[in-house]
Image (cartoon, helix red, strand yellow):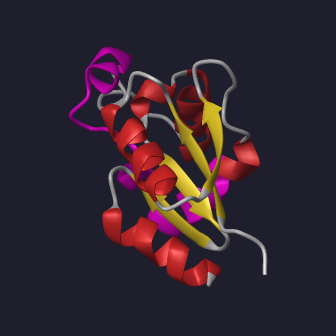
Amino acid sequence: MSAPQVQVFGTKKSKETRAAERFFKERQVKIHFVDLTQRPIAKGELTRFVQKFGLNELLDLEGKAYERSNLAYLRTTEEGVIAKVIETPELLRLPLVRGGKVLSVGEDLDGWKAMLEDAQ
């Protein structure tokens, strides 16, 4: 049985991302951190989250980046929004966390705990 590990997509500035890192570190879970300011999320990876939660659940609709992007007013396809999110990670509710088959968005203690249970 291998030690549980998770993949955390976020930014160093995001307090929710730091909360996720702290949560998993305190439980000795190996973290693969992907800093979205350094490396954009892969389209396939993002699509996995979109399929589970829907695009609107992933967007930080209250965030400044969303306001600046004018996404609320643009008539665009889901593909167009996904492309914009890949180039502007601040549009996302961070962090996106994947542990095994369990995915979570934002600060989601229940989702994170489920990842640990899934790894048992």
The residue under the point 49% across, 27% down is 11
Task: State the residue lying farthest toward the right.
Answer: 1
Residue 114 location in percent, x, y?
46, 77
The residue under the point 52% across, 82% down is 117
Q: Is residue 60 left or right of residue 114?
A: left
Q: Quadrant of residue 64?
A: top left
Predominant secondary structure, magenta span? helix
Residue range in magenta is 46-69
Q: In the image shown, does 115 or 50 lie closer to the viewer?
A: 115
Figure check: 24 above or below 75: below
Q: Is residue 71 visible?
A: yes
The residue under the point 47% across, 44% down is 21
Figure check: 65 above or below 2: above
Q: Is residue 93 visible?
A: no
Residue 115 location in percent, x, y?
53, 72
Residue 6 location in percent, x, y?
63, 57
Q: Quadrant of the N terminus?
A: bottom right
Q: Quadrant of residue 66?
A: top left
The residue under the point 62% across, 41% down is 79
Q: Quadrant of residue 80?
A: top right
Q: Is residue 4 left or right of residue 117?
A: right
Residue 50 location in percent, x, y?
55, 57
Q: Is residue 47 magenta?
A: yes
Figure check: 23 above or below 14: below
